[in-house]
Image: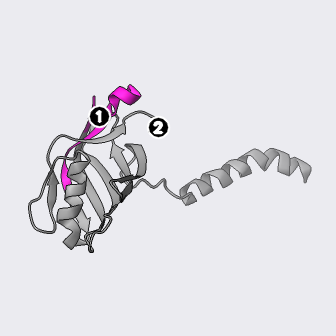
Amino acid sequence: MRDLITSKGPALILSIVLLTIPMSPPSLYAYGPGASWQIGVSGTGTLFGSGFGFWGWCTFVGDTSGTAGDCVFSQYLHVSMSNGNNVQCETHFDITGWDTGPGTMTPLTGQPDFFITSGTITVHPAPATPACLAFLMGAGFNVVQTSPSTGESVAPPSDLGTPAAAGHYSF
């Protein structure tokens, strides 16, 4: 019996391995195997008694430029004595072009920034679109509002103000 296990053991193990390979789950990629950048950003502050903040993430397909990506940002602006004029919104960027280059953060980081060169923005809730886009434009995005509530486009180039280099940055 021992001779049977020793002589057939390697073949049996190889057979089991080969049979289980097709059962292994496939690798899943939201943007394909080329998605090489994922970034997260956040910030809060006050100015003249008003509070503001943002949180978001982006993913980019490509090394230093590409034609696919995705970003989602949540923003708020709580104005003191606003009479209900506070802004809270979520923006989704469907990126169809991006690049890297010297930007607003380069003097602080020594690294290039991410730039969105083409794409569209959808704002939720839709009635907050004008105020939310004003928030983005105040942060340096070049945005063109093509309708009162949806289908906004990004005018190139829009500097995300995030370093295009691996690492953790605090400002």
Crowd class of label 1 (few under 14; some 14 to 19; many from 20; radius 10 Å): some
Give the numbered dot on residue 104: 1
Q: Which residue lies furthest to the right in this view?
A: 2
Residue shown at 42%/51% (left/top)?
Answer: 42
Q: What stretch is highlighted in magenta?
A: 99-121
Q: What is the quadrant of the C terminus in the image? A: top left
| Type of colouring | one colour
Q: What residue type is labelled 1?
A: Thr
Crowd class of label 2 (few under 14; some 14 to 19; many from 20; radius 10 Å): few
Provide residue 84's location: percent of width, then percent of height.
27, 74
Identify the image quadrant of residue 101.
top left
| SS for dot 2 | loop
Residue shown at 15%/59% (left/top)?
Answer: 152
User: Does residue 129 lie above or below 164 as drawn?
Assistant: below
Q: Does the magenta stretch include residue 143?
A: no
User: Does residue 64 lie above or below 39 as drawn?
Assistant: above
Task: Locate residue 71 relative to residue 157 in the image: left or right.
Answer: right
Provide residue 106's location: percent of width, then percent of height.
33, 29
Q: In the rendered image, which residue does mark 2 sit on?
A: 169
Q: Closer to the camera, 158 or 42?
A: 42
| SS for dot 1 | loop
Q: Closer to the camera, 139 or 96?
A: 139
In space, the residues marked 1 and 2 are separated at their CA atoms by 14 Å
Q: Does the magenta stretch include residue 117?
A: yes
Q: What residue type is labelled 2?
A: Tyr
Q: Residue furthest left?
A: 146
Residue shown at 15%/63% (left/top)?
Answer: 151
Residue shown at 20%/73% (left/top)?
Answer: 127
Q: Closer to the camera, 64 or 149?
A: 149
Q: Closer to the camera, 81 or 146?
A: 81
Give the numbered dot on residue 158: none
Provide residue 68's location: percent of width, then percent of height.
27, 48
